[in-house]
Image: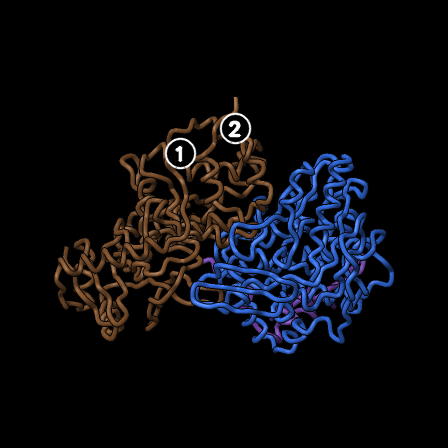
């Protein structure tokens, strides 16, 4: 799915996959921090955003 | 009837002048063919166009149209009360519309503007529209309008009929609305009425003689509805159908729609979208019952509506105007002409 | 090309006469140039209605589900792969389908041929590898190989993979250095250019769903676009809804699409929806070594788990 979105022009770094068990709380925090930083670095998303106006 | 001539060299200038008071629509070349679209900025209508893939119905009946909106914010006054959205119903003109498409608009009007109901969205758009028609000198291969209640130079539904005469257009002004548009363009070169009508008749006859395709509709009214409904040929007709919406969406007289609300956070909008009787959801009731859950029933319904129910209800001929778009675009080549002839000739076997 | 039609009719006739099958699903001549229409016949007297030529661009595997009794179906290479997928996915039983395999040299690109003319084509004659096309203003004589559909020119499986009867001699398969040049071309663009490409691609989509309905592997009784609780995709023409339909449909076909081209053939607006599915086909091949419908014993990659599945993209 990440590949197809990237193929359409959505930056690859907006889509992340991770196996995290509910017992791995520390890993969860680390992954979320990592994803947040990566997506923030790309900036606001303008593609595939529905216009409700 | 007043006739004028418009030198093609003056056409673009006149159209641009009319933009002061009219929004314009017309045929535009796209990748896959021509579409009738809003002519933004300086786009001119392509008056050399052959047939458009989609009809002009989206001028009055857009594929997706906002109808009402409401705020769901309980702190706001008037919350949860739906109001009609502001739409632009200022004068607009469709340039180069084909006579069969204009006739189709009149047929759709029978449904949207009745003594009991008046669809405000369609009617307001219709009343704002001036139809500047373009006669078809060379009818396309799929055009069977002469046997479907229209024709390449028919005037029904038009405000002005243009005839392409190489270096100029001969224009027959049919209504006051048409005159108003012509005035807005500044076209005023008069032409002799008698001679012009003769010229027009010659073009019309030539064009009609070039129509290669016909349908037979003379017996449709006399057939018993249930005989046609229970006829055995529907399974064969329907087999290849894939129940997409192509025929209904390209058709100028198909008028079915679906109403949906879309809500985000604190505001909601009610939309009207084109719907298709080909879809299995079309007649799905909230109970779960679906009176047309088989493909054959849906295919049959479309042809019965166009060629029988409408004929009986309005007594104005078939609901088909012979534009041929469904024949050209159907992915599996289901041909309404064949179905019509089959229905017209059908005799119930005892 | 030998259109195999005589053999097809012979086989169909035999099957119906001996009551080996109740129906034969094939193509018949259309009412307009370059058109054929799927047809079902149930008597040997009707076999002359069957045709097979380069205008038979749709996929008849679309019609084999929910049939009662045993049926025969004409299957080109790509169609036979979809039949295998149907059997693997329990949409049809192997012993219920009698496959009349037809080795195929490709279908014509009808829109490309029409584009050569300013007015409608009024006559189309196929004579071996030569196409004679006429409109009211001009005539063209064309080489079929120059006017093959995009998916046919890249086809690696022209011969049916399984069949009960073969209607012609097997044809040579081609080998390609690069089976996905169209996908590579898009991959070479940057993010914004890719987005532009796909925005323009779906610009004229009218949500008729001809692509989805012509596709043999789109058979969900309720498609995701029709779900209302919750509604995944809006039904209007808002661009994101249109894009989401195409993107998500392609994803549901990931690893199952055989690139038969029926979707593009059916589209009234000439949209190359294969740009979505081809990328996934390439990924399936590169990541899982998988091509749909080649092996009746295997399940598609998104259906099955193996410890070797690539997972370097998962943290």
Q: Residue B230's mark?
A: 2
* Residue at figure coordinates x 18%, y 68% from the top left: B187
Q: Colour of chain C?
A: blue
Q: Colour of chain B?
A: brown
Question: In this image, B232 relative to C217: left or right?
Answer: left
Q: Residue B220's mark?
A: 1
Rounded to the nearest whole Å, what is the CA distance between mark 2 and mark 1?
A: 15 Å
Q: Residue B275's mark?
A: none
- Per the image, label 1 sits on a secondary structure element best described as helix
Vertical position of residue B343 compared to residue C26: above or below: above
For the question of whether residue B73 can be seen, the reply is no
Dot 2 or dot 1: first in sequence order is 1
In the foreground, B179 or C245: B179
- Write down the chain letter for disc 2: B
- Write down the chain letter for disc 1: B
Q: Colour of chain A?
A: purple
- Per the image, label 2 sits on a secondary structure element best described as loop
In the foreground, B168 or B262: B168
């Amino acid at each position: 799915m990440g590949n197809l979105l990237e193929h359409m022009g959505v930056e690859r770094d907006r889509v992340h996959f991770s196996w995290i068990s509910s017992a791995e709380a520390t890993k969860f925090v680390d992954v979320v921090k990592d994803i947040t930083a990566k997506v923030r670095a790309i900036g606001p998303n303008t593609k595939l955003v529905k216009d409700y106006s | 009837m007043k006739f004028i001539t418009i030198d093609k060299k003056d056409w673009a200038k006149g159209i641009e002048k009319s933009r002061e008071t009219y929004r314009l629509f017309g045929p535009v070349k796209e990748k896959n063919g021509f579409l009738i679209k809003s002519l933004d900025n300086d786009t001119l209508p392509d008056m050399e166009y052959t047939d458009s893939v989609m009809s002009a119905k989206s001028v009055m009946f857009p594929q997706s149209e906002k109808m009402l909106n409401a705020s769901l914010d309980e702190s706001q006054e008037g919350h949860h009360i739906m109001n009609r959205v502001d739409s632009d119903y200022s004068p607009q003109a469709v340039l180069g519309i084909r006579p069969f498409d204009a006739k189709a608009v009149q047929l759709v009007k029978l449904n949207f503007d009745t003594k009991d109901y008046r669809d405000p969205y369609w009617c307001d758009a219709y009343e704002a529209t001036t139809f500047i028609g373009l006669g078809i000198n060379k009818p396309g291969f799929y055009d069977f309008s002469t046997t479907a209640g229209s024709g390449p130079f028919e005037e029904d539904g038009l405000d002005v009929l243009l005839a392409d005469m190489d270096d100029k257009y001969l224009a027959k002004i049919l209504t006051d609305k048409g005159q108003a548009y012509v005035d807005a363009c500044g076209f005023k070169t008069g032409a002799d009425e008698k001679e012009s009508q003769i010229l027009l008749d010659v073009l019309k006859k030539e064009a009609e003689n070039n129509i290669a395709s016909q349908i037979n509709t003379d017996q449709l009214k006399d057939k018993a509805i249930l005989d046609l409904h229970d006829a055995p040929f529907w399974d064969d007709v329907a087999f290849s159908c894939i129940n997409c919406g192509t025929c209904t969406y390209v058709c100028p007289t198909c008028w079915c729609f679906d109403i949906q609300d879309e809500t985000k956070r604190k505001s909601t909008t009610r939309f009207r979208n084109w719907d298709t009787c080909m879809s299995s959801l079309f007649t799905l009731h909230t109970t779960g019952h679906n009176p047309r859950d088989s493909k054959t029933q849906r295919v049959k319904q479309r042809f019965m509506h166009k060629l029988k129910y409408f004929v009986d209800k309005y007594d104005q001929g078939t609901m088909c105007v012979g534009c041929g778009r469904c024949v050209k675009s159907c992915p599996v080549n289901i041909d309404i002409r064949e179905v019509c002839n089959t229905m017209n000739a059908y005799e119930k076997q005892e | 090309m030998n259109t195999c039609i005589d053999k097809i009719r012979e086989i169909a006739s035999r099957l119906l006469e001996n009551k080996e099958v109740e129906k034969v699903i094939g193509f018949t001549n259309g009412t307009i140039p370059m058109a054929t229409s799927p047809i079902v016949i149930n008597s040997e007297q009707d076999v002359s209605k069957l045709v097979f030529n380069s205008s038979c661009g749709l996929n008849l595997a679309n019609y084999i589900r929910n049939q009662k009794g045993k049926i025969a179906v004409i299957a080109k290479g790509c169609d036979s792969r979809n039949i295998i997928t149907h059997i693997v996915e329990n949409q049809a039983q192997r012993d219920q389908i009698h496959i009349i395999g037809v080795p195929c040299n490709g279908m014509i690109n009808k829109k490309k041929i029409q584009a050569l003319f300013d007015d409608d084509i009024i006559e189309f004659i196929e004579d071996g590898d030569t196409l004679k096309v006429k409109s009211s203003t001009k005539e063209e004589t064309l080489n079929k190989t120059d006017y093959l559909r995009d998916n046919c020119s890249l086809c690696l499986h022209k011969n049916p993979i399984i069949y009960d009867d073969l209607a012609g001699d097997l044809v040579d398969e081609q080998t390609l250095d690069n089976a996905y040049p169209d996908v590579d071309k898009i991959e070479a663009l940057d993010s914004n250019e890719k987005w532009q490409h796909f925005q323009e691609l779906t610009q004229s989509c009218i949500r008729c769903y001809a692509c989805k309905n012509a596709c043999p592997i789109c058979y969900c009784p309720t498609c995701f676009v029709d779900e209302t609780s919750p509604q995944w995709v809006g039904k209007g023409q808002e661009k994101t809804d249109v894009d989401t339909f195409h993107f998500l449909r392609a994803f549901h076909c990931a690893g199952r699409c055989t690139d038969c081209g029926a979707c593009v053939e059916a589209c009234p607006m000439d949209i190359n929806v294969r740009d979505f599915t081809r990328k996934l086909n390439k990924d399936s091949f590169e990541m899982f070594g998988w091509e749909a419908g080649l092996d009746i014993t295997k399940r598609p990659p998104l259906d099955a788990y193996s410890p070797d599945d690539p997972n370097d993209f998962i943290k």
